[in-house]
Amino acid sequence: MLGEGRSETLAGHGPKVVTQQIARTIEDAISAAGVQASDIAGVGCGMPGRMDVNGVILWSPNFPDIEGFPLVSEVSGRIGLPVWMENDVNVAALGEFQFGAGKSVQSLVMLTLGTGIGGGIILNGQLWTGFNSGGAEIGHSVVNPGGRKCGCGNHGCLEAMAQRDAIIERAALKMQSGQKSTLAEEVDYQIDKITPALVAKHAASGDQLSLDTLAETGHWVGIGIANMINILNPEMVIVGGGISQAGDALWKPMLRGAYAYAIYESRVVCQIVPAELGDNAGIMGGVALVLKAMGR
Ligand SMILES: [Zn+2]
């Protein structure tokens, strides 16, 4: 890694401003690396949502007014370099596949656990994005029909059952029931102070409320993983995102769930491992996108 740039996306200010922010970040990274734009082969980007093959955004719920906007050509025009863009979790999966935890395998599923739950699928060394870029929405596979309401409108999606807010809600409900807990004491019984990181911290020191919260969460993620194992029979499932760092309190129930629901012959050959690249998965996936476009 030669240089880095960081900017807010300013998503609420519309696509022109988002374009400007992306271009500025790229220029900052180029100057931090101490190279010229003419030294750069191309730019690889990850973007939440889905886009068509020409880089026109079809759907991206967290970026208002961006649907129908030709983001790739706008960014490319501004910086004078070729740009390739993919869904952000697909790009992260590509990064882990080429440079991280998945270096040694040819087929993998990646899950990112955070505010939402993203998915990426690599089959036979190729990113699988679906017939019209809507594939690998593993977060919207239903693991608990009738369960918690999801942002997509359904109930009981993996995302709805295990995203950040679901963890907080789960801990809050237990807290309200009066269960004694060091987590409850630390946040002074105020629900809006609960974070998944705090839940993980108290689970690690044996707080039962926090342990139960993460065990239930891990159970749902495990079912989601088992479904992917049963459908795809991958060599590896990589679990990343901030919440994946919650430790054994999450991982043990998650692995138990995966093993309980996956077909034996498929799960014994499938490694379920943590992501290795952290926040850099998307960046390295961007590199992989450019290399792929160049036929390397
Ligand atoms: Zn959903």
Image (spheres, rainbow, N blue to C red):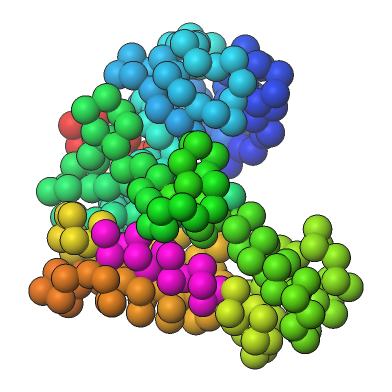
Q: Residue 130 location in percent, x, y?
A: 24, 33
The number of discs equals: 0
User: 270 or 212: which is nearer to us?
Assistant: 212
**At x 23% / y 39%, what residue is drawn?**
128
Q: Quadrant of the C terminus?
A: top left
Residue 31 placement: quadrant: top right
User: 59 or 223: which is nearer to us?
Assistant: 223
Q: Left or right? Give the position of 138 relative to 154.
A: left
**At x 67% / y 34%, what residue is drawn?**
7
37 to 225, vertically: above or below: above
From where the camera sits, is residue 3 visible? no
Q: Left or right? Give the position of 274 relative to 160.
A: left
**At x 15% / y 76%, what residue is drawn?**
264
**Which residue occupies the extreme front position in the image?**
146
Residue 4 placement: quadrant: top right
87 to 171, vertically: above or below: above
Q: Residue 52 location in percent, x, y?
A: 34, 19
Q: Residue 17 location in percent, x, y?
A: 66, 17
